[in-house]
C-alpha cells in the first residue's frame, strides 16, 4: 500500500468514525453550566450592580458608582478582546497527558467559579468598608475572572475540530452544545429572580443574601459541568492534526486570523448580531419591570427561548441535510427584523409582545450554530492558505466577539438604566414618555440596525458553505497524499494538511506534482485557497 493510500484510508477513518453517545452527552453538558455562567457574568452582574450592590448608598452617589463600575467593565472587556487570540494560541500550543483542551476546561472552570462568587459579593463585603479599595481590587479580580472564563470557553469550542473533521459531525456536536447552552443560558433567566427573591427572605425584594445564594449555585454548576468535559471527552489525533505544521507564536496567530477573509467576514456579521442580541436581552428585565409593570410575566423571556432552542437544536442537523446553512442564517436574521418591528410598535400589547418574543428567540439557535460551523470550517480554509492549522485561535474569535457584545451590553444596560431612571426604588408608575422613548431607542431601534447590517454582510461576503468545505478538505487531502509520496521537505513545509478523499478533479490541472520544496509551497496560498473556495 502506498503512503498516499495509507493517508487517504486513515483520513477516511478519521472522518467517518461514529459519534460516541457518552462523549456527545459529556461534551454537551459542559456548555450547560458554561452558558449559565456566562449569562450571570455578562447580563445579571450589571443587574446586580444597579439594584443591590450599592443599595445602602444615596441614590445620587449610587448612580455615580454604578457608572464607574459599568465603565470599568466595558474598558476591561474591550482590552481583553485582544487577549483572546493570545489565549487561543496558548491553548493551541498546550501539550499534556490530558491533551490540548481539557487542562483549560479544568483550570478555567474551577478558578472562574471562585472568582465570580467574589465579584457578586462585593469582594466579600469590601464594598461596604472601603469603596475606593473595592474599585481597585475589583478591576484586578474581574480581569483575572474574564481571562480564566475565556480559557474555558475557547478550549470548549476549539475542541470540536479535534473531535471530528467531518462538517456534518461538527454540526452535531455544535448543535448539542448549543442545545444545552440554550437550556443553561435561558434556564438561568427563568430561575434568577425566583432564586434571588427566595433567598433574600425579604417579602419579594432582592437583596445581597439572595444574590449570594444565586451566584454560589451558578459557580457550582459551572465547576461540575467543566469536570464533565474533562473526564468525558477525549481528542482524536487525526492525520489532519498530527501532520499539520506547528502552530507558531502569537504574532503568527494574529496574522492567521487577519488573513483568513472568510473567518473575518463571518466574524463581522456575527458581531452585528451579537451586539443586537445582548443589548436587547440585557434590558428585557427593564421592559417588564419599568415599562409594562408586569414582572410576573418576565419568566416568559426564559421559557420562550428554551422552547425555541430545544426545537431548533434538534432540527438543525436534520434541516442542514436539505437546506444549505447559508439560507438558514439569512432567513433567521430576516425573522429577527420582523421581531424588532413588533417590539418597537407593540411592546406594551401583551399578545403581540409574546409573538415578538417568539420571533426574536426562534432563529437565534440556527444563527449561532451556522456561525460556529462556518468558523470551524474556516480552519481548513486558513490551513490551505498557510499550511498551518490554528484550531483554538480560530475558534477564539467567537468568544472574542461575544466579549465585544458583552462589553457593549454591560455599558449599555448601565447607561439605559441611569438615563431612563430605571434604578433603585423606581417603578413603572415613575416612568415618563421620554423615559420610554429612550428605552425603546436603545433596546430595539439601534439593535434593529445592527441586525440588518449583519444580514447584508453575510449575504454578500461569506462564501464558505458545505460544498466549499468539502472542496477544501479534498484539496488538503491531495496535498497530504502527494507529500506522503515524497513531496515533503525536512522543514515540514506543506506536509500533512487534510483529511477525507474528495472526488472532484479540479486539483488535477494547473499544479505541478509536489516533488520539491518549491512545488510543495505552490500547493498552498491565498490564490489557491480562493479558487478552491469558489469552485473555480
Image (tube, rainbow, N blue to C red):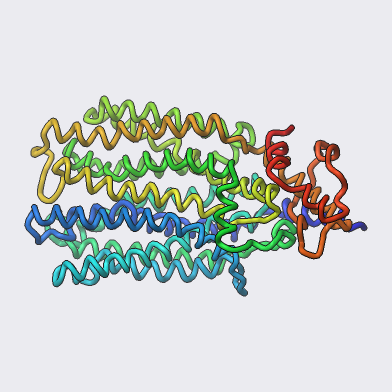
Residue farthest along the left direction in this orientation: 58
The correct choice, above or below, for 141 with respect to 464 in the image is: below
Residue for point 72% across, 62% down = 242
> Could you say where residue 306 lies in the image, as x and y percent from the top left?
40, 44
> Could you say where residue 100 lies in the image, as x and y percent from the top left?
59, 66
Q: Quadrant of residue 250?
A: bottom right
Residue for point 13% across, 30% down = 433
Residue farthest along the right direction in this orientation: 1
Residue farthest along the front direction in this orientation: 518
Query: In the figure, is residue 379 to the left or right of 188?
Result: right
The correct choice, above or below, for 438 with respect to 497 in the image is: above
> Could you say where residue 389 lies in the image, as x and y percent from the top left?
66, 56
Query: In the figure, is residue 115 to the left or right of 212?
Result: right
Query: In the figure, is residue 430 to the left or right of 390?
Result: left
Any part of residue 311 in sight:
no
Q: Quadrant of residue 441?
A: top left
Query: In the figure, is residue 309 to the left or right of 447?
Result: right
Residue for point 72% across, 36% down = 531
State how many labels appear. 0
Quarter occupied by the C terminus: top right
- In terms of depth relative to the viewer, which is nearer, 60 or 118? 60
Quarter occupied by the N terminus: bottom right
Q: Quadrant of residue 490?
A: bottom right
- In terms of depth relative to the viewer, which is nearer, 256 or 223? 256
Any part of residue 421 in sight:
yes
Amino acid at each position: 500500500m502506498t503512503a498516499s493510500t495509507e493517508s487517504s484510508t486513515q483520513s477516511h477513518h478519521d472522518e467517518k468514525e461514529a459519534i460516541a453517545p457518552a462523549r456527545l452527552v459529556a461534551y454537551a453538558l459542559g456548555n450547560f453550566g458554561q452558558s449559565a455562567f456566562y449569562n450571570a457574568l455578562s447580563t445579571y452582574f450589571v443587574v446586580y450592580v444597579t439594584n443591590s450592590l450599592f443599595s445602602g448608598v444615596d441614590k445620587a452617589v449610587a448612580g455615580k458608582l454604578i457608572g464607574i463600575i459599568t465603565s470599568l467593565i466595558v474598558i476591561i472587556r474591550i482590552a481583553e478582546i485582544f487577549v483572546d487570540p493570545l489565549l487561543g494560541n496558548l491553548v493551541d500550543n498546550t501539550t499534556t497527558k490530558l491533551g490540548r483542551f481539557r487542562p483549560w476546561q479544568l483550570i478555567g472552570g474551577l478558578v472562574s467559579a471562585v472568582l465570580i462568587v467574589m465579584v457578586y459579593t462585593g469582594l466579600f463585603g469590601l464594598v461596604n468598608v472601603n469603596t475606593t479599595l473595592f474599585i481597585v481590587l475589583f478591576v484586578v479580580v474581574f480581569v483575572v475572572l474574564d481571562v480564566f472564563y475565556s480559557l474555558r470557553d475557547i478550549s470548549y469550542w476549539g475542541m470540536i475540530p479535534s473531535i471530528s473533521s467531518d462538517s456534518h459531525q461538527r454540526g452535531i456536536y455544535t448543535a448539542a452544545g448549543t442545545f444545552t447552552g440554550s437550556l443553561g443560558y435561558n434556564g438561568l433567566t427563568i430561575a434568577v429572580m425566583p432564586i434571588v427573591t427566595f433567598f433574600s427572605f425579604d417579602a419579594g425584594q432582592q437583596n445581597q443574601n439572595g444574590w449570594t445564594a444565586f451566584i454560589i449555585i451558578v459557580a457550582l454548576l459551572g465547576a461540575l459541568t467543566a469536570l464533565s468535559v474533562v473526564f468525558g471527552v477525549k481528542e482524536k489525533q487525526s492525520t489532519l492534526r498530527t501532520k499539520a505544521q506547528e502552530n507558531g507564536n502569537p504574532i503568527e496567530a494574529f496574522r492567521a486570523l487577519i488573513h483568513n477573509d472568510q473567518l473575518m467576514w463571518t466574524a463581522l456579521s456575527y458581531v452585528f448580531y451579537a451586539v443586537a442580541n445582548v443589548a436587547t436581552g440585557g434590558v428585557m428585565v427593564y421592559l417588564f419591570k419599568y415599562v409594562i409593570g408586569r414582572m410576573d410575566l418576565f419568566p416568559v423571556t426564559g421559557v420562550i427561548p428554551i422552547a425555541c432552542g430545544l426545537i431548533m437544536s434538534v432540527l438543525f442537523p436534520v434541516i442542514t441535510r436539505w437546506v444549505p446553512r447559508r439560507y438558514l442564517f439569512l432567513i433567521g436574521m430576516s425573522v429577527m427584523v420582523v421581531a424588532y418591528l413588533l417590539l418597537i410598535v407593540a411592546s406594551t400589547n401583551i399578545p403581540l409582545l409574546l409573538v415578538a418574543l417568539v420571533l426574536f428567540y426562534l432563529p437565534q439557535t440556527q444563527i449561532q450554530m451556522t456561525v460556529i460551523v462556518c468558523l470551524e470550517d474556516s480552519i481548513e480554509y486558513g490551513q490551505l492558505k498557510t499550511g498551518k492549522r490554528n484550531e483554538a485561535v480560530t475558534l477564539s474569535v467567537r468568544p472574542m466577539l461575544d466579549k465585544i457584545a458583552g462589553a457593549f451590553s454591560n455599558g449599555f444596560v448601565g447607561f439605559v438604566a441611569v438615563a431612563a431612571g430605571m434604578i433603585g426604588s423606581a417603578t413603572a408608575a415613575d416612568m415618563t414618555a421620554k423615559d420610554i422613548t429612550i428605552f425603546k431607542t436603545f433596546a430595539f431601534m439601534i439593535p434593529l440596525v445592527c441586525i440588518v447590517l449583519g444580514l447584508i454582510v453575510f449575504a454578500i461576503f461569506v462564501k464558505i458553505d458545505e460544498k466549499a468545505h468539502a472542496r477544501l478538505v479534498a484539496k488538503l487531502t491531495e496535498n497530504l497524499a502527494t507529500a506522503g509520496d515524497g513531496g515533503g521537505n525536512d522543514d515540514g513545509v506543506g506536509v500533512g494538511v487534510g483529511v477525507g478523499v474528495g472526488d472532484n478533479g479540479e486539483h488535477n490541472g494547473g499544479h505541478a506534482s509536489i516533488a520539491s520544496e518549491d512545488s510543495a509551497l505552490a500547493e498552498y496560498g491565498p490564490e489557491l485557497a480562493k479558487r478552491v473556495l469558489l469552485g473555480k
